[in-house]
Image (cartoon, rainbow, N blue to C red):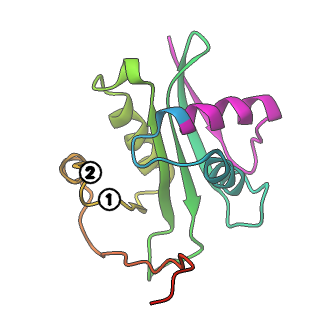
């Protein structure tokens, strides 16, 4: 039987659950390759263990094995940007393409009250998948990152 687990600032997450979740997200991330520190930051922001607007984490588990998990953070915005941002999505390699991601994303949309956005790498091929789920292209994020090299 598949069990749905919700973590948020009110339900709390134990240290052991957090370590298991961080390892799972790091090893199985679908929408990017994140370091342990990046995953930990997103998880701790979602449950407000770091200064943030909070958010939530959804996980699907069967017989104590994580099938999939996602992390959503709140942006603190009401009109300029979506109130919720899907930061990370991870599906166990053995359970990909069997509806786990679809199930989790549907639950995340519901949990976020229908106000959910995500960033995608335009070259990774996931755009069509999310458009089929009802997401629409609205903005292009451009990011400047200081690499320490002179221009």
Q: Quadrant of residue 127?
A: bottom left
Find the magenta span and give its range: 1-26
Which residue appears at 44% of the width and 76% of the height?
81
Q: Is residue 20 magenta?
A: yes
The percent position of residue 141, horizontal first and vertical second, equals 37, 75
Which residue appears at 41% of the width and 50% of the height?
109
The percent position of residue 51, horizontal first and vertical second, equals 77, 66
Q: Is residue 86 shown above or below 149?
A: above
Query: Furthest-bottom residue in view?
Result: 151
Numbered tag placed on residue 110 in the rendering: none
Q: Is residue 100 magenta?
A: no
Looking at the image, residue 45 sits to the left or right of residue 16; the answer is left
Asked whether 8 or 119 is in front, the reply is 119
Numbered tag placed on residue 124 in the rendering: 2
Q: Quadrant of residue 57?
A: top right
Q: Secondary structure at mark 1?
A: loop
Which residue position is annotated with label 1? 121
The percent position of residue 54, horizontal first and vertical second, equals 67, 60
């Amino acid at each position: 039987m598949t069990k749905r687990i919700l973590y948020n600032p009110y339900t709390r997450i134990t240290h052991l659950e957090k370590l298991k979740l961080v390892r799972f997200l790091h090893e199985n991330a679908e929408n990017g390759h994140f370091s342990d520190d990046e995953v930990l930051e997103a998880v701790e922001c979602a449950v407000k263990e770091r200064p943030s607007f909070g958010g939530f984490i959804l996980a699907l588990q069967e017989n104590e094995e994580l099938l999939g998990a996602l992390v959503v953070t709140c942006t603190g915005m009401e009109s300029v940007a979506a109130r919720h941002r899907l930061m990370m999505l991870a599906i166990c390699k053995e359970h990909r393409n069997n509806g786990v991601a679809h199930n989790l994303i549907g639950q995340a949309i519901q949990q976020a009250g229908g106000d959910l956005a995500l960033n995608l790498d335009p070259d990774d091929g996931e755009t069509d998948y999310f458009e089929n789920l009802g997401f629409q292209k609205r903005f292009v994020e451009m990011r400047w990152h200081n690499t320490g090299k002179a221009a």
